[in-house]
Image: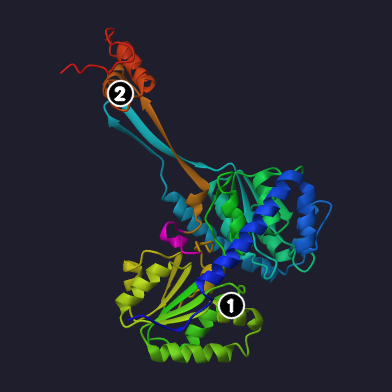
Amino acid sequence: MIRYLKQGKAQAVRREEEAQVRATVEAIISDIEASGDEAVRQYSRKFDHWAPADFRLSRAEIETARGQLSAREIQDIAFAQAQIRNFAEIQRASMQDVEVETYPGVLLGHRHIPISTVGCYIPGGKYPLLASAHMSVLTAKVAGVPRVVATAPPYQGAPHAAIVTAMDMAGADEILVLGGVQAMVAMALGTQSIAPVDMLVGPGNMFVAEAKRQLFGRVGIDLLAGPTETLVIADESVDAEMCAVDLLGQAEHGPTSPAVLLTDSEALARATLTEVERQLTILPTAEIAAQSWADYGEVIVCDTVEEMLGKADELAFEHVQVMTRDPDYFLEHMRNYGALFLGPRTNVSFGDKVIGTNHTLPTGRNARFTGGLWVGKFLKTCTYQKVLTDEASAAMGEVCSRLCHMENFAGHGEQANLRVRRYGRRGEVPWYQPVPALD
């Protein structure tokens, strides 16, 4: 039996908040579409108190930002980017172009073609998430994207030096200091000063995620990556201190970040509730984490491992930290998750910052139907066909003609008929009629 020792806000309350976000985003998109740079500047001034003459950084401004970092800081960014680049390159190498003769004289294939231009959003208003530059910009460049635009909001009234440096080291072709919905719309639709992109990627708050949702179709998106989520699956092989640290380590992201403990030990569940309250008295980011835990934190107790698996798949969380006696059980059986972190030696923070897997992951139960950002998201798998012989053209044409007429498509059928007449040397085939079989 599944029981809750703690629950967050009711779903009805959350849906009402989401409706308010949708309306706000819709209005901003409409304004920017109508007024371009003027509206972008207006919203940037309103939300970020930032309205420079040009949101795009010059080469000199990028070098100035880099000069603000120590050698150690630059080395640490380089180390993280090396891990992420290495794994992205391994993933890219796994994606092979295909060309095969599937029928005598018929050649079919596919090619992986990089998207032409991508806009990467790097969150940075509350926390300067420079790691998002590695995850989006660098991965796009490994995929072969020719033009990558990277943007982040100002931090405390200025470009954040580490974010700008990480963007530049990752290979960004253009760097903007612009945040929020206004950044997403400017990149997607273009303005007088910002050329549009073909795809938007990157995580963000609920407003940024909603902007991506509303802009999808006019541009591509990677996935809906809203406020971060973490699910800790644990049994008595770990203690409350570790569970609480891993819950609060993600709850500090923002006031709407769900953090959930799923366990088959009521003793561990109750001990973790107590330990969370203790850590909230000493955590430097407790103001945010405490609100997130109060409104979105949950503690769920199950009777069996199978119940935990079923509940975890139902939740379909972004991050799933598994600290059980047999974490591989969840690797082998779980289907719905953004990323798994198996065993107590790893944790979500490793994945967020340095280990090499991508931290832009599906939220809001979207893990039921998509994985996270990876090099393959920046590639279009496009098929092609080529018919090499007259005999193959006639053979395909004969069957195609009859199939087209089963669907009442006379024009489609005539495309096939023409090939039968010319390449099958069957001049008697009538126009707009199915090709008779010879056998």
- The residue shown at (45%, 54%) is 91
Badges 1 and 2: C-beta atoms under 8 Å apart?
no
Task: State the image coordinates of residue 187 (x, y, percent, origin top left).
Answer: 67, 48
Residue picked out by circle 2: 405
Residue picked out by circle 1: 292
- Residue 82 as seen in the image, left or right of residue 424: right
Question: Residue 51 magenta-drawn?
Answer: no
The correct choice, above or below, for 14 with respect to 266 in the image is above
Q: Nearer the viewer, residue 365 or 319?
A: 365
- Residue 39 as seen in the image, left or right of residue 288: right
- The residue shown at (30%, 23%) is 405
Task: State the image coordinates of residue 391 (x, y, percent, origin top left).
Answer: 27, 18
CA separation, marks 1 and 2? 60 Å
Instruction: Give the quadrant of residue 331.
Output: bottom left
| The C terminus sits in image quarter | top left
Q: Nearer the viewer, residue 241 or 67?
A: 241
Question: From which residue to which does the magenta span run?
Answer: 364-371
The kind of residue on which mark 1 rests is Ser
Q: Residues within 10 Å of mark 1 (few under 14, many from 20)?
A: many
Task: State the image coordinates of residue 412 (x, y, percent, origin top left).
Answer: 37, 22
